[in-house]
Amino acid sequence: MAKYIFVTGGVTSSLGKGIIAASLAKLLQARGFKTTIQKFDPYINVDPGTMNPYEHGECYVTEDGAETDLDLGHYERFLNIFTSQVNNVTTGSIYQTVINREREGAYLGKTVQVIPHITDEIKRRMQLLGETNNYDIIVTEIGGTVGDIESLPFIEAVRQLQWELPDEDCLVLHLTLIPYLKAAKELKTKPTQHSVKLLSENGVHPDILICRTEHPLGDEIKRKIALFCNVKLDSVIEAADASTIYEVPMAMLKEQLDVTVLKKLNITSYNEPELGKWKDFLEKLKRPRNKVTIGLIGKYIELQDAYKSILESFIHAGAMNDCKVQVVNVHSEFITEDNVGEKLRELDGLLVAPGFGFRGVEGKVIAVKYARENNLPFFGICLGMQMAAIEFARNVLGITDADSTEMRADTQNPVIDMMEEQKKITIKGGTMRLGSYPCHIKENTLAHRIYGKTDISERHRHRWEFNNAYLNRFENAGMIASGLNTASGLVEIMELPSHPFFIGVQYHPELKSTVENPHPIFVHFIKASKEFAEAKNSIKNPLLQSEMI
C-alpha cells in the first residue's frame, strides 16, 4: 500500500514547493523507493492549456497529451520519469467531474455540496496513483498558500485523509518563510508561527516544517520554531537559498529530510542514496571550462517561467559540454532589419522559441534570416521552425508573401497552414495536437547524427503545420524535411545541410530533457555554438589560435 506525503505552503507564494517536493522525491527514489509526484492546483481552469504564459508560465505537456502545470516539468527533470494527466489535478477538473456526475443522476437526487462530494473527488484523485500503480511513496504538492479561499477544499481533503489513513501512511510537510529584517539584523519566526496556526485551524497539523531562509537558522531559532509550532526539533528543516535548483536535493540530504520522513512513515529499512550521476552533473555545472552566449528569441521574455523547460534544457546540455550557457533574452517584437545585427552580433547560437499569435513573428523571421546568412548555429522549436520555413520561402524561394494562416488567414501562399483535422474544432481547451507522436528520420542528415537512430518519439503542442504542397520547392532549393510522421506525412524536422548547424523541429524537445538524459538536440546545439564561439575568438585573437595549434 502506498504512503502519502503532502506538501503545503504558507506565508507567501513562490517559495518553491515544487522544487522541495521534487527534491524529496529524488532522495526517496535514490534510496530505492518507487516514487512519483502529483500537483493539485486551486484555479478553476480545467487545465493551463488556454492560459496566457504571462498568467501561468509555460504549459507543460506530458507523454499522454495532458496540458499541465510547469512543476510537472521539475518532477520529470528531477526523477527522470514520465508523468501523466493524473499527476496534475485542478479545481476546475474536480468540479467538472462532480457536475457531470450530478447531471447523470449519480448522486441519486441528493444535494451536491463541497463536503462531501467535492472533497471525496479530491481524495479519490489523491489516491488514484497509489491504487493503479505499484508506487511505494506518492508526494502530493498542494498549490497556492494556506489561507487562500481557493485551497480550502484541498486542505480539508488532506485533513480527512490524515484521519482515515494510518498515522504511518500519511505525512504533511509545510513550507514556510523565515524572513530576515536587515534593520534589526534578526530572523523572524512569527510568520511561520502564524502560518502553522492557520493550517492547524483548518484541522491539519504539519509533521515537518521546511523553512526557506537567506541566512542560517541556527539551533536557537530551530528550537523556537519547534516549540511554538509543536513539532520535534529534528522536524525543523533549513532550506537555505541555493545558487541553482539542482543543489536543493543535496541540501535536503544534508538536512536529513529524507531520513526524517522515512522515520515518520515507519520505514526502517532503506538503502544509502545513489546520487552519483546527480553529483557528476553538479560538478560539471559548477565548474564549466567554456562559455557560450545563446540568444533566446521570444515574445514572453518578461516572464522567465514562460520558457522554463528551454532554460533548464540549456543547463543540462551545458553541463554535458562542460560549458556555461549564458542566455540573452531578445524580444522578437523589437527586432527589425535595421537593428538585427546590433542585437545578435555577439551571439554564439540562436534559438527561436515557440509561441502563438501574430505579435512579434516578423522579428523572428528577421532573426532566422540573420542566422542563416551568417552561419550562426540556429535551432527553431515549433513556431520557430515555422518561422524558418517562412523566411526561407520569402528570401530564397522568392515567395515574398509567404506566410502562416495563423498570422494571415487570407495569405495566397500558406507555407504554414492549419492541420486538416484542426479546421473544424471550435472548442480550444485540450484540442491541439498534443502528446507524444512518432517521427522517422532520414539517414545521413543532421537530425540522424544528433539522435543516432531513425525512429524517435517526441511531444507536440500545435495546430499549424508545414504545408507539404511546398515541400518539393523547399527541398530543391536546399532546405530538406529530415523528419516525418509517416502516418500523416507531417513534417517534423527541417534542416539546411549547407549550413554548419541549422535545424527546426515541429515538436517540443525541451519537454523531454532531464538531468540524467539531456536532450540530444540541445546537446548538439550547444556543442555547435561552442565551436562557433571558439572559431570566432580565434579570429579575434590570432595569438590564441597559435597557442591552440
Image (tube, rainbow, N blue to C red):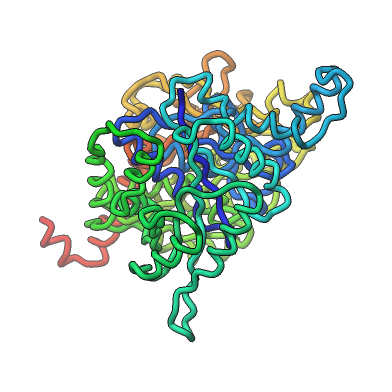
Residue, x 58% and y 41% (percent of image)? 69
- Considering depth in this image, is 323 or 479 the residue closer to the camera? 323
Residue that protrudes farthest toward the top in the picture: 487
| Residue at (36% x, 54% y) in the render | 234
- Residue 143 in the image, given as x and y percentages of width and height: 60, 47
Q: Is residue 370 left or right of residue 238?
A: right
Image x and y of residue 107, in percent: 82, 21
Q: Nearer the viewer, residue 56 or 416?
A: 56
Query: Which quadrant is the C terminus positioned in?
Result: bottom left
Can residue 494 be seen here? The reply is no
- Kindly tell me whether residue 89 is visible in this rendering: yes
What residue appears at the point 70 percent right and 28 percent down from the top-left corner? 431
- Between 508 and 47, the one nearer to me in the picture: 47
Of residues 394 and 76, which is closer to you in this image? Answer: 76
Q: Is residue 524 above or below residue 148?
A: above
Q: Is residue 167 left or right of residue 539?
A: right
Q: Position of residue 426 (x, y in %)?
A: 81, 29
Left or right of 123: which side holds 239? left
Asked where in the image residue 455 lies, by quadrant, the reply is top left
Horizontally, is 11 left or right of 448 in the view? Answer: right
- Total marks drawn? 0
- On screen, residue 452 above or below 45: above
Quadrant of res 415: top right
The image shows residue 111 at horizontal and vertical percentages of 87, 29
Residue reaching furthest bottom?
Answer: 183
User: Residue 512's quadrant in the figure?
Assistant: top left
